[in-house]
Image: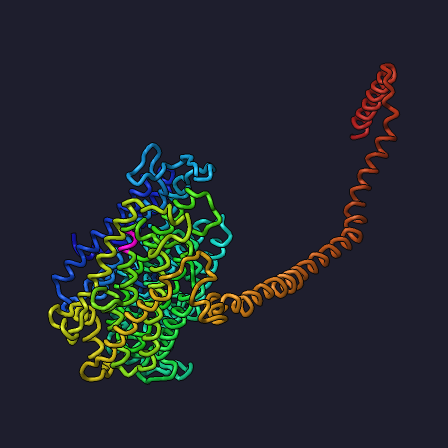
């Protein structure tokens, strides 16, 4: 099958599964998940075939002559807006991690939504069957939850979610990229609020949808401006050197930015919303209200990854827009927002007790690293961390779901439903209860922390720090270094509280390992959380440089290397190699991990008030735990004024006062005119004429009704009289007519 055909088919498989589940198989849970997983597998298989073919072509040839295919879509007068697919080195790299993470999440979802075992079965761990009644240690009876009642709907939604990401990844233009972008925005709303009977889930879905729409409006403005300026949305046309120079030399008239600078800034605001960067970060932690596979999809495979991918894809335009080094140029803004967000979110994560919420703020922080890397001028480092992060963050979220399920078993056994199975202080000692989950989670946590050499996260994070340091962005470098230290600290805090020591609650004592459908994806992702970094070991790295070629740098770098050189957009880089970033990476990673373990290894109580960090930081800990009160601040600044505006101004003044008042005034005027017409014309003229005719007929009837006596004799006399009169008349006419 031609590569272009495969590119077209990648998004089609999950879309087809969505349609079939919604229309035909939604009542059959097994068939529904089979269709969804089968579609994910076919897309994975197609992506792997495409990736292998890309390797055979080589990065330089693929970058110089991307494989593409397009068709006319929307007529625009003399031309058409086109939709198409494209394969270049960047697309191939992104498809690899998207395909693997999506497939693993789909498989995991089967075990996640099947809490126990099918009726009549028990596995070797002794898990009870669905619908079974169990008796806890207090003699209380509990019914094991059945399969998720909206099971088929869930698999339909994640199929549509996967379609949006595949469409975005293979698009050769901004228009269809934006279509996939918005489909994922819809799916995030549907899946974050999946358990819509729960008020907090409904609110979280709405919050995510509305917050990301803010960024999307600006992104759409950027797309419209770009089309107006260039007449095209095709990446290959936009990135021609002459087009980039033209955009860089046209003054936009806004903040001293060129057209390229303003377009890049508008597009980046879309990423701020989609990838939850400050100040539009508030939706992502609340997204934990959805099922855990949804969290993994959003944080690793689709939603937030799409935001970073878009600015990586548009890097030549962002670079051209920053050529004049304006204060608010796209790359300068990205460097600030990325570094600030990385540190800001990391400080919040250290004070969270919900196992998923810690990971949510971790994602916000790690996305900040990628944005900062782009701001420092390296799309290669940003892409490298995007891919490694996808693997270890999917692993961590799926691992957290496994932990929560294990704790929920404990809750069922004890019958104490007041215990929060997501609060890490209620855990402890789970390494013995859930060994597969523990070891895979440990690998993911070490990768997130940048554990030296052995994990993928170390290599990608070290490249970002090196890029920031060598490009002269020293403030960005030290900010990211502090954030990396905090990342290692809160990760080890999470691992220690969850898995190490002794169980702090009876629920943790009864926790059990989850089914193979959940643990196998964890093992696969753990493999990539270790090995994905080996393809990007710097050639200058002491001891290991040169043993393995820096394949990733060569591969992804080829995407825009020639183009940037021809457009004279290659940035200045310090000569040689510095050990400062490397030593900093080693110090913050190992130091943060050790301090996290040292701080929390002796925690024995499930009471969060015993948190050592709370004792050290005092009121500052409260501020961090409450996320700097950003939700409350936005309530005061945006939500309440918007609600007041909608209630008082729009509803009372505009709707009821102006609109309803105008309509009522018109109605009263028409009513009064009708009333005047009725009394002045209708009653005296129309009704009077009708009444006159009626009265005349009535009078005539009354006058002649005397002839209706009811006596035959009278009728005979009247008839004879009529005949005589008629005869006389005829005689008169005959005689006198002549």
Q: Position of residue 14 (x, y in %)?
A: 30, 50
Q: Position of residue 509 (x, y in %)?
A: 37, 48
The residue located at (31%, 53%) in the rendering is: 431
Residue 285 vertical placement versus 279 (above, below)? above
Q: To which quarter of the image does residue 459 belong?
A: bottom left
Residue 471 vertical placement versus 140 (above, below)? below
- Quarter of the image for the C terminus: give it: top right
- Whether residue 69 sits left or right of residue 196 in the image: it is left
Q: To which quarter of the image does residue 153 belong?
A: top left
The residue located at (84%, 16%) in the rendering is: 716
The residue located at (26%, 63%) in the rendering is: 387
Residue 51 visible in the shown view:
yes
Report how many numbered discs are placed on residues in the image. Answer: 0
Which of the two residues, 405 or 242, is positioned nearer the viewer here? 405
Which of the two residues, 109 or 353, is positioned nearer the viewer here? 353
* Colouring style: rainbow
Which of the two residues, 460 or 622, is positioned nearer the viewer here? 622
Give the magenta-colored segment's residue range: 436-440
Furthest residue toward top: 713
- Whether residue 615 sits left or right of residue 391 in the image: it is right
Which of the two residues, 395 or 558, is positioned nearer the viewer here? 395
Q: Position of residue 21 (x, y in %)?
A: 35, 43
Residue 83 visible in the shown view:
no
The residue located at (49%, 48%) in the rendering is: 197
Q: To which quarter of the image does residue 490 belong?
A: bottom left
Q: Is residue 598 magenta?
A: no
Q: Main secondary structure of the magenta part?
A: helix
Q: Position of residue 176 (x, y in %)?
A: 32, 61
């Amino acid at each position: 099958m031609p590569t272009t055909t495969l590119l077209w088919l990648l998004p089609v498989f999950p879309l087809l599964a969505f349609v079939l589940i919604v229309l035909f198989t939604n009542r059959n849970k097994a068939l529904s998940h089979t269709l969804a997983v089968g579609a994910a597998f076919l897309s994975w298989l197609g992506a792997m075939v495409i990736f292998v073919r890309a390797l055979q072509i080589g990065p330089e040839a693929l970058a110089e002559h991307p494989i593409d295919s397009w068709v006319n879509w929307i007529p625009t007068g003399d031309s058409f807006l086109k939709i198409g697919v494209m394969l270049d080195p960047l697309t191939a790299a992104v498809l690899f991690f998207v395909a693997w993470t999506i497939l693993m999440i789909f498989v995991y979802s089967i075990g996640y939504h099947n809490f126990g075992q099918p009726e009549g079965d028990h596995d070797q761990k002794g898990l009870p069957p669905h619908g079974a009644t169990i008796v806890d240690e207090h003699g209380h009876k509990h019914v094991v939850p059945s399969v998720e009642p909206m099971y088929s709907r869930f698999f339909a939604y994640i199929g549509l979610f996967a379609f949006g990401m595949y469409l975005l990844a293979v698009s050769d233009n901004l228009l269809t990229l934006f279509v996939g972008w918005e489909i994922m925005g819809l799916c995030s709303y549907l899946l974050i609020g999946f358990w819509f009977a729960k008020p907090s889930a409904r609110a979280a879905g709405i919050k995510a949808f509305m917050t990301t729409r803010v960024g999307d409006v600006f992104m759409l403005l950027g797309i419209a401006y770009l089309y107006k300026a260039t007449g095209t949305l095709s990446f290959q046309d936009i990135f021609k050197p002459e087009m980039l120079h033209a955009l860089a030399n046209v003054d936009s008239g806004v903040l001293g930015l060129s057209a390229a600078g303003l377009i890049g800034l508008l597009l980046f605001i879309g990423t701020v919303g989609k990838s939850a960067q400050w100040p539009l970060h508030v939706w992502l932690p609340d997204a934990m209200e959805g099922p855990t596979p949804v969290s993994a999809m959003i944080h690793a495979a689709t939603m937030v990854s799409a935001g970073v991918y878009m600015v990586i894809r548009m890097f030549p335009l962002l670079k051209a827009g920053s050529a004049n080094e304006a204060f608010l140029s796209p790359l300068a803004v990205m460097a600030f927002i990325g570094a600030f967000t990385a540190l800001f979110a990391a400080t919040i994560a250290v004070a969270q007790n919900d196992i998923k919420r810690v990971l949510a703020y971790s994602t916000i922080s790690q996305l900040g690293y990628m944005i900062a890397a782009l701001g420092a001028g390296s799309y290669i480092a940003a892409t490298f961390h995007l891919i490694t992060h996808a693997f270890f963050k999917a692993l961590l979220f799926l691992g957290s779901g496994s932990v929560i399920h294990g704790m929920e078993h404990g809750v069922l056994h004890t019958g104490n439903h007041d215990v929060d199975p997501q609060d890490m202080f209620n855990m402890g000692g789970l390494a013995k209860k859930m060994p597969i989950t523990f070891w895979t989670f440990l690998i993911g946590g070490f990768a997130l922390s940048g554990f030296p050499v052995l994990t993928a996260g170390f290599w990608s994070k070290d490249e970002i720090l090196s890029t920031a340091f060598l490009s002269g962005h020293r403030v960005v470098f030290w900010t990211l270094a502090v954030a990396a230290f905090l990342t290692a600290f809160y990760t080890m805090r999470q691992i220690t509280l969850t898995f190490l020591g002794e169980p702090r609650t009876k629920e943790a004592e009864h926790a059990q390992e989850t089914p193979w459908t959940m643990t196998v994806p964890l093992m696969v992702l753990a493999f990539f959380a270790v090995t994905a970094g080996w393809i990007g070991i710097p050639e200058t790295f002491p001891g290991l440089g040169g043993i393995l070629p820096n394949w990733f740098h060569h591969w992804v770098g080829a995407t825009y290397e020639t183009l940037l050189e021809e457009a004279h957009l290659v940035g200045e880089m310090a000569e040689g190699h510095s050990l400062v970033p490397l030593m900093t990476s080693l110090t913050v990673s190992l130091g943060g991990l050790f301090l996290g373990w040292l701080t929390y290894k002796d925690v024995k109580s499930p009471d969060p008030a015993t948190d050592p960090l709370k004792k050290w930081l005092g009121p500052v800990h409260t501020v961090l735990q409450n996320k700097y009160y950003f939700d409350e601040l936005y309530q005061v600044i945006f939500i309440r004024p918007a609600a007041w505006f909608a209630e008082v101004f729009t509803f009372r003044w505009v709707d009821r006062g102006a609109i309803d008042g105008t309509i009522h005034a018109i109605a009263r005027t028409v009513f009064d005119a009708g009333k005047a017409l009725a009394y002045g014309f209708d009653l005296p003229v129309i009704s009077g004429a009708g009444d006159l005719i009626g009265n005349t007929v009535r009078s005539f009837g009354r006058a002649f009704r005397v002839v209706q006596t009811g006596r035959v004799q009278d009728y005979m006399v009247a008839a004879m009289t009529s005949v005589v009169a008629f005869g006389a008349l005829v005689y008169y006419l005959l005689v006198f007519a002549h």
